[in-house]
Amino acid sequence: MNLTSTSFQLLTIAVAVVATAALVLLWNRVPGKPVVRFGQRLLLLVLGNGLTAVAVLVSINIAYGGLVVSFSDLFADTSGGPAPTSTTHRNDSGGIAGRLKGSGGPGQTPSAEPQRSPR
């Protein structure tokens, strides 16, 4: 399941709705002492808000054309997985390689003088 698939988006939205419904339904049914009830209610609030935030972030990721495409891309797994879909290649210094004439690549220094065309 890709992070940019519609099924993943619908799954995160459904889980967020279920978590919010569980919060509303279980709020007064939490058993225990007041301190324990407070902790359990706080956990329900954090889970509900966290799952809603994940659903919103997945929707934003899809809306912007797939900033993060796969789980290996999300967790920076460089051991394999699908090939990157980006066509822009960055060099080691963080700049975009091959855009400027004479910019050089990783480990190369650009020439001090600008290149001139022969007359």
Image: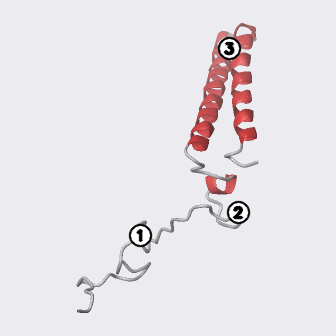
Report which quarter residue 52 is drawn in.
Answer: top right
Among the two numbered marks 3 and 2 on one chain, the one whose residue lies closer to the N terminus: 3
Q: Is residue 91 left or right of residue 18?
A: left
Q: CA distance from mark 3 to mark 1?
A: 52 Å
81 up-or-down from 114: above or below: above
Q: Which mark is residue 82?
A: 2
Local crowd size for mark 2, using a 10 Å CA cut-off: few (<14), some (14–19), many (≥20): few
Element type at mark 1 = loop
Does residue 46 appear in this view?
A: yes
Tell me the mark number nearer the camera, choosing from 3 and 1.
Answer: 1
Q: Position of residue 48 (x, y in %)?
A: 65, 24
- The three-letter amino acid code for the residue at tag 2 is Pro
Along the line of sight, the residue nearer the viewer: 68 or 53: 68
Q: Which residue is mark 1?
A: 93
Going 43% across and 74% down the picture, which residue do you hit?
98
Q: CA distance from mark 1 to mark 2?
A: 24 Å
- The three-letter amino acid code for the residue at tag 1 is Ser
Element type at mark 3 = helix
Q: Position of residue 61 (x, y in %)?
A: 59, 43
Along the line of sight, the residue nearer the viewer: 39 or 101: 101
Q: Which mark is residue 66?
A: none
Report which quarter residue 100 is drawn in.
Answer: bottom left
Q: CA distance from mark 3 to mark 2?
A: 45 Å
Q: Which residue is mark 3?
A: 37
Element type at mark 2 = loop
Among the two numbered marks 1 and 2 on one chain, the one whose residue lies closer to the N terminus: 2
Going 58% across and 41% down the picture, which residue do you hit?
63
Does residue 32 appear in this view?
A: no
Going 43% across and 79% down the picture, which residue do you hit?
105
